[in-house]
Every structure is written in structure tokens, then in C-alpha cells.
Image: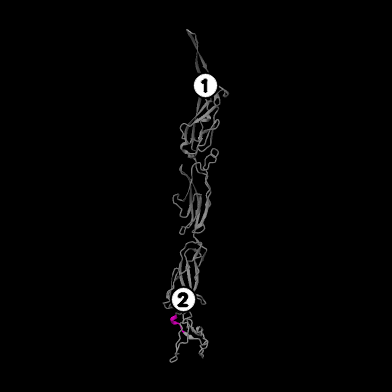
Amino acid sequence: MDKTFTITATSVLSTSFASDSFVVTLKNECWDATLGGLVPASLTPALVLWASHSMSFTAFTSSLLSTQCGDIVYTLNDGNLPANDVYSLSGLAVVGQPTAIDPWVGTHTYTITAQQGNYASSTTATITMTISNPCTGTVIDTTPVLNAMSASMLGTDDTEQVADITDSIDAGTINPNTDKCGVKTYTLFENDGATDPSAYISIDANRLITLSPPLGTTTGTFTIQLHITLPLYSKTSIETFQITITACNVLSITAPVIADKTHIVDSGSAPFTHDAFVQVPNCQYAFIYNAVEVFTGPPETTGTLPNPPFSYTALNFGMNSLEVAEVKLYNIRIIAVHTGTGVTTSTKDFTINVIAGCDNNEITLDDTDPIVSQDYFLETPAVTLDLVDTYTETVASCPLVYAISYGAGDTPDNNFVTNFDTTTG
């Protein structure tokens, strides 16, 4: 753009004056520089979502040198794309990597503007980019090979790790290509492709399959389907594998500790409860309990638990000494039986010693340690008589009460017996 200035010269005399004007034009050729250059055809490519793009263009030309008017500066305008644009200029290239279906899949127009220095003269070129989604035609065909699995009901679980599936899109164009087509879901079904088998086999967020059949699961060999799905595109790959479920097999049964008992006739009711038998592994089979009397023999035999005075119902043993009972040592056996597989039966023996009640206690003088008559003199030191071992009883646990009496006419004027203990004699 030229700048024009008008200059006027004036001469003045005392009685008159004269003037003349002329025009001066200042020209800056940079304002009129001509910019040009063609955008090559490579700037209208068919691009792929998730790929890293770099689209070069040739430098724009100018009719004037940069030493005269400055360097050519480039700017990029995205026109119809949102503020979170991923494309920018890097030298003589448009670079970027679109990473989402919305808004990137489709056709977009960019404008490259070239301006030399700070002058107004500029020129533009457009880039039309068509971005496609490579997942619309993908098929999940890189499926894992799963091993057969087996487990027993309530036994040791079996696990299988599913490899992470990469999307079957061009790894040369999109690298790495894992999960480029969105989040995948992994779901298990029975062989009908619809029934949920999670009651006995499941898969977690880390793709770990666990076979853990509970008690009552049908045994046998079955086919399970693993569905690997891309929900965004309604695409599913199905892999099948075999599982075998067997019955829970009890390897051992541990009986509880039941202490031997002593019971006195007429001492009242004395029920007790014992712990349950334990199966290993814990197959959760229900035990059926029974109690019998054991006769040592030989040969050893068993008979019905005497009722009265005893009773038994699954872990609960009753003893009632008010009932008629034979005074003796009873050998008792608890029997636990389940209807599952493996070890099915276990027993626990203990004794109950039933002894006579105190109402039937008999006290006799011990002839081996009689009380000897003795003469005692007045004013002599006090004498201590120990009567504890003098008497014997048939029921040793019954307490004895001691008392002193005098024969008729033998009561002394004053009681010379002092400190008599009625419980120990």
C-alpha cells in the first residue's frame, strides 16, 4: 500500500505572496507482495480414527524476499470443529491424532493461511480430511485358547486366566491397537448361549475365570461359552471350552472332644452339648447323629442307649438321675454319618460313670482304725481327737455330718468338749 503526501511551497513579500504545490508518493513494495503456492493432493487423504496423522504441505512462495519483507507465517483454522481440536501445525505439516468417534469420524475442512511479516497481503489453502472408523468392519478373531477346567463341589476351585484380546485392526496403521475399538466385555454362558452359569462358574474384571461349584450342582462334563463383545459395534466372538464337575469327596472326618462324665443318682438333670463332627474338605454334607451303648465284650457289641436315664438328639445329650438307672460305668459311642461321597462315617467314644446317690449311702465304723477308750485327767492339756478316717461310706462323695452325744446319766456337769467341727469330726 502506497503512502501519498502533498507538499506546498509559499513565497511572501511585503505586498504580495506566491505558492506552488507538488505530490510525493512513498511506495513499500512489501504491501504488494504476491504470495502463492499450491496445496498438494496428499492433503486430501482418507484418514483413520486413532491413527497418528502428519500431512505435509509445500511452502508458500512470495514475489519478495524474506530479507525485504520478513518470513512467511502460517496459521491453521479448524472452521467447523470444536475447541478440543487435536490438529495443529508443526513446521510445514498438519499433525494430530483423533481418538474418539464423536466428533472426529466424518469429513472436516481446515484452512491454512500464509502471511509475510506484518503486512496485510496473505493467501489461503484448504485441506479436506475424511476420517473413517476402522472398527466398523473389524471382527474379533484373535480369541484365546482356554484349557478344560474341573472342580468338585465345595472342593478346590479351578481358575483360568483369559488373555487380553487385541482388536483386529491394522497394527501397521494404528500401533498399538489394543482397545482402540472401545471397551470389551467378557461374559460366560452355558452352551445354549443364553443361560447364566454364574452359580458355579464366573469371570471377573481381570478376566479370571473361576469354577467353584456349590453343593447340589449337577455333576458331569459341560460346554461353556465365552462371549467377547465390542458393545459399541454389537460385535461378538464366541469361544467354547469344557468343564467337568464332580461330587465333593470327603477325605477325612474329625470327631470333637467329649470328656468322660461322672453322674450321681438323684443329683438332678445334667444335659450337655458336644461340638459337631468336621468333614475335610468342608463339603457341607449334613450329618445324621446317633448314640449307642457299647459293650466291650469280647466280642464288642452295641445296643440301644438306655432311656431313661439317657437321651440323645443331634449334639444334645441328656442325663436325668431322677430316672431309674443302673449304677455302673457306661461306655457311650456317638456315631456321625453323611450320605455324600468319600469318608462317610466317624465315631467318638466316652464314658459316663453313674454312681449311687447319697440317699443310699452306708456309713460303717472302720474296724482297722477304731476309737480307743481313754482316761483323761483334769487339769491336763487339751487333747485333739481326729475322727475323719474312723468311718467309711459306700458313696465317697457324700458329705458326712459329725455330732457328739453322751450316754444316759453320763452327761458331765460342764461340757469339756470344745471346738468340735461337725463337718470334719
* Residue with the mark numbered 2: 263
The percent position of residue 1, horizontal first and vertical second, equals 50, 20
Q: Are marks 2 and 1 in contact (CB under 8 Å)?
A: no
- From this viewpoint, which residue is outermost toward the bottom? 409
The percent position of residue 114, horizontal first and vertical second, equals 52, 27
- Circle 1 residues within 10 Å: few <14, some 14–19, many ≥20: some
Nearer to us in this view, 341 or 312: 312
Q: Which colour scheme is used?
A: one colour
Q: Which amino acid does label 1 sit on?
A: Trp
Please name the predominant secondary structure of the magenta segment in the image: helix
User: What span is in magenta?
Assistant: 358-362
Q: Which amino acid does label 2 sit on?
A: His
The percent position of residue 116, horizontal first and vertical second, equals 53, 25
Nearer to us in this view, 366 or 147: 366
Q: Which numbered tag is attached to residue 77? A: none
Nearer to us in this view, 105 or 67: 67
The percent position of residue 204, horizontal first and vertical second, equals 49, 51
Residue 208: in sight, yes or no?
Answer: yes
Relative to 9, residue 267 above or below: below
Q: Nearer the viewer, mark 2 or mark 1?
A: 1
* Residue with the mark numbered 1: 31
- Mark 2 vs mark 1: which is more N-terminal? 1
Nearer to us in this view, 208 or 265: 265
Q: Which residue is drawn at 54% across and 20% down?
A: 29
Relative to 388, residue 6 above or below: above
Q: Describe the element under mark 2 as helix, strand or loop.
A: strand
- From this viewpoint, which residue is outermost toward the left? 322
- Circle 2 residues within 10 Å: few <14, some 14–19, many ≥20: many
Relative to 21, residue 232 above or below: below
Residue 148: in sight, yes or no?
Answer: no
